[in-house]
Amino acid sequence: MSAKRLTAKGEATRHRIVVAAAQLMYEQGISDTTMEDMRAATGASSSQIYHYFADKQALLLAVIDYQTGAVLDLQAPHLDHLDTISGLRAWRDLLVGNQKRLQCRGGCPIGTLGSQTAETNPEARLAVASGYLRWENAIRAGLTAMYSRGNLNGNPDDLALALLTALQGGLLMTKIHRDVRPLEVALDTVLDRISSLSRTLPAVTTNRGRGGRTDRRLSAASTLIEQTFTSG
Amino acid sequence: MSAKRLTAKGEATRHRIVVAAAQLMYEQGISDTTMEDMRAATGASSSQIYHYFADKQALLLAVIDYQTGAVLDLQAPHLDHLDTISGLRAWRDLLVGNQKRLQCRGGCPIGTLGSQTAETNPEARLAVASGYLRWENAIRAGLTAMYSRGNLNGNPDDLALALLTALQGGLLMTKIHRDVRPLEVALDTVLDRISSLSRTLPAVTTNRGRGGRTDRRLSAASTLIEQTFTSG
DNA sequence: CAGAAAATGGATTGTCCGATCCAGAAATAG
DNA sequence: CTATTTCTGGATCGGACAATCCATTTTCTG
């Protein structure tokens, strides 16, 4: 609301504070991140923080906004190619690889903020929900394109939401178990579902019995579906 | 570790404290729940809490244990019947109905604890992970039974994990959006996947195009899969 | 070059919170 | 009945925390 006038220097300081706050809140949670923590992390003074943010709540809202952008930026190169199975698989690989790189720590920057605020901070909850909608829209755009081309025999809205939701659950379980498998399995299961509803020939990771997660043979079922679509 | 001797009265007081702490931590988060909050909620005195629990951490661990039991108890009637599609759907209806009853508030009691502790509290993280394993095992037992009967053409371990993970993501998104749809769609998508890998004739909720989430007709693909399984 | 506005430094304040302490009451065991 | 253990009450302490205040420096503007 307050359209404060900011110097280039002021803008930089404000940004430094938001970035540091985002990182700290991501690592230790919102309540356990003190103003002093952020002050120390930025090398700023207490009054600087309160110069740019009315209170901790205002800073939190700025963090939510920043993290939403950061999450979408990270995926930006892939978000325009979610209209093919291979594009979806590449996106999946990015997300899984990213968690491996982080040693399965942290989870989703947006999800952790949402989880902490949903019940006690309506303003923050709405900001997070709005961030999720931007994300969901990007995924939906890809699946809708598939659908419009006639390459997806299912509801693209539902499948987009299912993908994002599986991703969120996968990130949560992965950080709790310190194991990337939940994320892999969650995404692969929904992607396999999408593949099975797709008329294009997918590199199916469908499991045929135990231990078959890395099996890349086409399943009989998928083959039949393929035949159905191409002959119908 | 400390095998303290407890009177019946003492046991009751201890239990009251755990239940109140669980509820408060569920509603306002761990850090934002103070010892004074719990003291007031139970009508106990400060020294009573510290008589039964060494510190807040010990109380938290008791809460995690309690919530794990509560979550499993709630589903107990259904957990023995997750070896058929209809049993799985009934379980899904319980979970969805429960969230509706709660007006989409709160999310998963275990997940919220895990999300808050995973990065900063190794002991709590392991306790939550252990709780999830119990839950996952129950689901896996059902799918493994299906698999053993030859009614599931997929990896039951992966599908069980996918189900639980979809549930967790669904609960998170549902509480943030205050809308039960993410939970419904997340579970239905994985259940549809399981149905499509099942040789029994499912009441498929597969979507055929937009707006088809409530469509219960059998899809051509499912019919073909069915024929494949029964003729092979 | 003024004068105004923005940015910074650092001490301070009042409150809250986890934890401790010292009793005394109630229950149990011998 | 009495000694011992368990249970309860409530005051209190030291530290941490969000937020405020006032002064000073730096940057912008006309």
Image (cartoon, coloured by chain):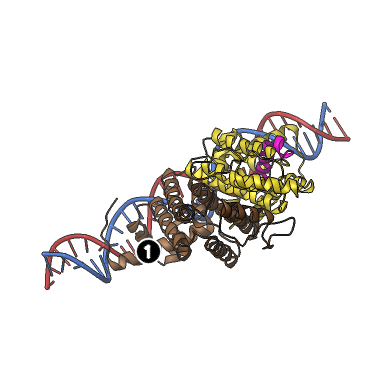
Chain colours: A yellow, B brown, C blue, D red
Front one among B95 and B161: B161
**In the image, what residue occupies the spot 39% across and 65% down?**
B16
The reply to whether the magenta stretch includes residue B229 is no
Q: Please, is residue D1 above or below residue A40 in the view?
A: below
Q: Which of the 4 image quadrants contains residue B220?
A: bottom right
Q: Using the image as rendered, state which of residue B10 and residue B201 is in the foreground.
A: B201
Q: Main secondary structure of the magenta part?
A: helix
Asked if residue A33 can be seen in this view, the reply is no
Q: Position of residue B192 (x, y in %)?
A: 61, 55
Q: Chain of mark 1?
A: B
Q: Position of residue A187 (x, y in %)?
A: 60, 44
Mark 1 lies on residue: B15
The answer to whether C9 is drawn above or below residue B193 in the figure is above
Q: Where's residue A230, x and y in %? A: 74, 45
Identify the secondary structure beneath mark 1: helix
Q: Residues within 10 Å of mark 1 (few under 14, many from 20)?
A: some
- Magenta residue span: A61-81
Q: With B139 as the anchor, is B226 left or right in this view?
A: right
Q: Residue furthest front?
A: B231
Q: Nearer the viewer, residue C19 or B103?
A: B103
Q: Was residue A72 drawn as part of the magenta stretch in this picture?
A: yes
- What's the residue type where badge 1 is placed? His
Q: Position of residue B167 (x, y in %)?
A: 56, 54
